[in-house]
Image: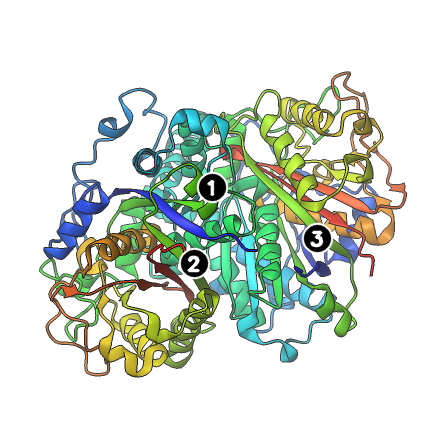
């Protein structure tokens, strides 16, 4: 009999709040983290808006590492880890370090480090690049920094499956715990605001001029964002033994690949539907039992339409009964962090019996005709939450969390 | 009942051959792929040589069409996947009926693509970058492109744990099959050689030629070692659930018995914690495989000529194997292939499968003066004739990541 795995702590660094309490309060209030980009000059870009984390000082939270020696994504991740460990009341002194691991996801790793490299390259000043580049750029340094900050010496992985990476990382941590390879895992995602990412999405014409309006008839695109979320996962018996707070149980997941196009989703949402079907089968849950879907919902015309189609294919008539919202309407698209932040939102929805809204949904789109929880949070019991995330490369994922019945 | 995971085929692109058998022969002949770099200008660099795939012609594997949108990493992965699918008998018809997936280990994917995209935006302006190039800047781009090319609709994951990425990807895929989430997965790693990563390693003083000029070459475990050389390549293994592989009549080359992973909290800076991290990773793999150390007939080490980590790995091996170390043939193929980063663990695994089939473990090129505090009696430049029923692959990173994998001959026991 494989052990049941539960979520016992959340750590979040977002544009609408640091810490899961601040995040939850603001996401239910519909607060937006979207504003004019401040981290670099956007003149010359098709787009001026972003959802940046402002007023963030990693040194206020860290006890082991010096944030000056880390990139911004690692700073987000290490702070999220500290907050998650505290939230779970994990006493690190009672953890066997070798049995404690880290599983992270990202889109860009530490993009600011390679951007600095390129600034020097373009300025023909290669001598300005020192040994810190190779020590701080590769994306595996993010989970390495997390582990070093909290003292976890077990399995340490980075799964850079772009905008679905957080879900992949949580799924990997879940498997690692179920197979008995660890006693506790920190799992999540982190991404820093990046010139490279912004340039790319601007060139694709994907950035909305003003704000993010998932499922709205006049939606004009996504808004790049940044942040991190880390979940503490551990076996149920262990959580009960130590009297830990339990947010939710991880029921299962599904992964698939479109094998269709590197940036565009499958026209019929085939891969995303297969990921949802696999997640339901893995979890042994009927579509009718799902009480909330946290949508990928980027706000681009095609994503929201195709995701709606895929949900209808999987849920059939039940699709119209399941509330489905996109918090990207407030946080923008935080890339590899997005599905980790959204997984945390699912855990909070289960604990508090409340669903965060899709903001800025003013005029319904006839082709997007499901219940998107428009503009106002909704109180209702959430027993099963499905978290969808899709990515470049056709990497699809659905993660299912459920209320933990003991 | 947990499923058993077997290897039914392999595809490789290396400086020492593009078939597992050819690579094995070259390793046993003690050849090296080290050569002057042609991919980027090396003027002003202290080191000007690497294990470059100078004559890699993607069209030989993939035809001429549709290559333009793919960068070097994607081309390496797609070509290696073509070879592995062909070798294992996964025809396009079969792939239509059954989901095949891909788990790719890579340290950077293409940091050259990422940088060229960024620099174009910097010098010409953000409107002059190509959207297609942007698609290739994500670290999962090569795995995604390979899925599109070969219609791989199953689990598609990218694992980035630095030098251990390739082996960690095989471990990840093994667990996906063991737990029933997949039945057939290509797994391994790939890395391209490019200026950005090369310069980063040079500036960090990790390349042997940074200090000692271009006559320098990597000599794992040798007292004269003074750094690594960078390489490139790709290696993918077809991993399958043993039962379904048998049903479809596949040739089974070897079985994966277990794996382990750990992290060195000192990130390689403290000898004691580094040795401890590697040794408990090896032990964890043995435990996962349900084996004792004495049952291991041969070992492929991660050692790449680095001053510090080679000794730590050797001492960890000696610690785990105790008296059995005296009977344990050890190889270090990075003496010939260079440090191929995300590809390295997969190349080690693929080469070891060939050694098991042939009964010969390649010697460590140029190893003459074993470092004094390394006690690996059977590490030498000579090939070892051995009946290799079970082997251990060790992979150790620069930033504390460790991974180990145990292979065995498939006996259906």
User: Which sits earlier in the primary sequence, circle 2 or circle 3?
Assistant: 2
> Does A102 appear above or below A215?
below
Residue sitting at x 32%, y 72%: B313
Q: Secondary structure at mark 3?
A: strand
Chain containing the residue with disc 2: A
Q: Where residue A298 sits in the image (x, y, percent)?
A: 66, 32
Q: Circle 2: is it few (<14), some (14-19), or many (20+) Cα within 10 Å? A: many
Can you see residue B33?
A: no
Q: Where residue A235 sits in the image (x, y, percent)?
A: 68, 64
Measure the C-alpha gap from mark 1 to mark 3: 29 Å
> Count of labels shown?
3
Measure the C-alpha gap from mark 1 to mark 2: 43 Å
Chain containing the residue with disc 1: B
Chain containing the residue with disc 3: A
Q: Quadrant of the N terminus of chain B?
A: bottom right
Quadrant in which residue B332 is drawn? bottom left
Q: Label 2 belongs to which residue?
A: A136
> Does B132 appear above or below A330?
above
- Same chain for mark 1 and mark 3? The answer is no
Pick out the residue farthest to the top. A366
Q: Where residue A56 sits in the image (x, y, percent)?
A: 64, 57
Q: Label 1 belongs to which residue?
A: B244
Q: Label 3 belongs to which residue?
A: A250
Q: In front of the other: label 1 or label 3? A: 1
Q: Are marks 1 and 3 in contact (CB under 8 Å)?
A: no
């Amino acid at each position: 009999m494989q052990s049941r795995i539960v979520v016992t702590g959340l750590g979040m660094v977002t544009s609408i709040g640091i810490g899961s309490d601040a995040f939850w309060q603001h996401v239910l209030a519909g607060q937006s983290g979207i504003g004019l980009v401040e981290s670099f000059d956007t003149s010359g870009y098709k787009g001026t808006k972003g959802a940046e984390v402002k007023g963030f000082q990693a040194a206020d939270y860290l006890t082991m590492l010096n944030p000056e020696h880390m990139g911004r994504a690692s700073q987000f991740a290490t702070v999220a880890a500290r907050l998650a460990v505290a939230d779970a009341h994990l006493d690190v002194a009672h953890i066997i370090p070798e049995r404690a691991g880290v599983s992270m996801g990202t889109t860009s790793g530490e993009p600011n480090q390679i951007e600095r490299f390129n600034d020097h390259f373009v300025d023909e000043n290669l001598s300005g690049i020192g040994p810190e580049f190779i020590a701080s750029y590769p994306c595996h340094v993010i989970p390495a920094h997390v582990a070093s900050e909290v003292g976890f010496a077990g399995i340490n992985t980075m799964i850079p499956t772009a905008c679905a990476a957080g879900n992949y990382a949580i799924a990997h941590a879940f498997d690692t715990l179920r197979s008995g390879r660890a006693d506790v895992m920190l799992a999540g995602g982190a991404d820093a605001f990046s010139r490279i990412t912004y340039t790319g999405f601007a060139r694709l014409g994907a950035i909305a001029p003003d704000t993010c309006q998932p499922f709205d008839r006049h939606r004009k695109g996504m808004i790049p964002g940044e942040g991190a979320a880390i979940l503490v996962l551990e076996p149920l018996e262990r959580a009960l033994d130590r009297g830990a707070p339990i947010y939710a149980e991880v029921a299962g997941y599904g992964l698939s690949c479109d094998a269709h196009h590197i940036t565009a989703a499958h026209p019929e949402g085939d891969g995303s539907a297969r990921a949802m079907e696999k997640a339901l089968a893995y979890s042994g849950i009927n579509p009718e039992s799902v009480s909330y879907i946290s949508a990928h919902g980027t706000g681009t015309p095609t994503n929201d339409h195709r995701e709606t189609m895929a949900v209808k294919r999987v849920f059939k008539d039940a699709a119209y009964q399941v509330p489905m919202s996109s918090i990207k309407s407030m946080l923008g698209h935080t890339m590899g962090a997005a599905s980790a932040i959204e997984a945390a939102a699912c855990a909070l929805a289960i604990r508090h019996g409340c669903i965060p809204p899709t903001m800025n949904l003013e005029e319904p789109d006839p082709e997007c005709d499901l219940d998107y929880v428009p503009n106002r949070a909704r109180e209702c019991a959430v027993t099963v939450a499905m978290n969808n995330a899709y990515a470049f490369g056709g990497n699809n994922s659905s993660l299912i969390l459920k209320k933990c019945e003991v | 009942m947990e499923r058993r995971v077997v290897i039914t085929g392999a595809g490789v692109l290396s400086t020492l051959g593009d078939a597992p058998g050819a690579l094995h022969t070259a390793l046993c002949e003690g050849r090296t792929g080290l050569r002057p770099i042609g991919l980027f200008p090396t003027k002003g660099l202290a080191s000007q040589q690497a294990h470059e795939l100078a004559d890699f012609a993607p069209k030989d594997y993939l035809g001429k069409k549709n290559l333009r949108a793919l960068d070097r990493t994607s081309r390496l992965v797609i070509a290696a996947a073509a070879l592995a699918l062909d070798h294992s008998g996964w025809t396009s018809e079969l792939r239509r009926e059954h989901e095949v997936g891909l788990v790719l280990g890579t340290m950077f994917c293409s940091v050259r693509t990422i940088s060229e995209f960024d620099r174009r935006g910097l010098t010409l302006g953000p409107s002059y970058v190509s959207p297609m190039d942007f698609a290739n800047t994500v670290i999962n781009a090569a795995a995604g492109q390979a899925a599109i090319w070969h219609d791989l609709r199953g689990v598609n994951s990218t694992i980035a744990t630095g030098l251990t990425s390739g082996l960690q990807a095989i471990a990840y895929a093994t667990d996906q099959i063991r737990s029933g989430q997949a039945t057939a997965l290509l797994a391994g790693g790939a890395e391209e050689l490019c200026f950005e990563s090369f310069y980063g390693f040079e500036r960090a003083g990790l390349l042997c030629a940074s200090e000692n000029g271009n006559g320098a070459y990597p000599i794992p475990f040798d007292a004269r070692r003074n750094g690594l050389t960078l390489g490139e390549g790709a290696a993918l293994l077809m991993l399958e659930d043993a039962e379904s592989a048998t049903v479809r009549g596949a040739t089974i080359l070897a079985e994966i018995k277990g794996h382990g992973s750990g992290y060195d909290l000192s990130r390689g800076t403290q000898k004691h914690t580094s040795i401890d991290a590697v040794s408990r990773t090896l032990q964890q793999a043995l435990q996962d495989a349900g084996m004792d150390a004495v049952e291991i007939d041969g070992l492929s080490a991660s050692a790449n000529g680095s001053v510090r980590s080679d000794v730590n790995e050797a001492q960890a091996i000696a610690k785990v194997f105790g008296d059995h170390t005296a009977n344990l043939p050890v190889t270090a193929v990075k003496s010939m292939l260079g440090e191929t980063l995300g590809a390295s663990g997969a190349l080690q695994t693929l080469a070891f499968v060939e050694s098991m089939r042939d009964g010969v473990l390649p010697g460590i090129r140029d190893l003459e003066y074993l470092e004094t505090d390394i006690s690996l009696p059977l590490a030498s430049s000579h090939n070892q004739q051995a009946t290799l029923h079970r082997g251990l692959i060790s992979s150790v990173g620069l930033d504390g990541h460790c991974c180990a994998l145990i292979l065995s001959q498939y006996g259906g026991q």
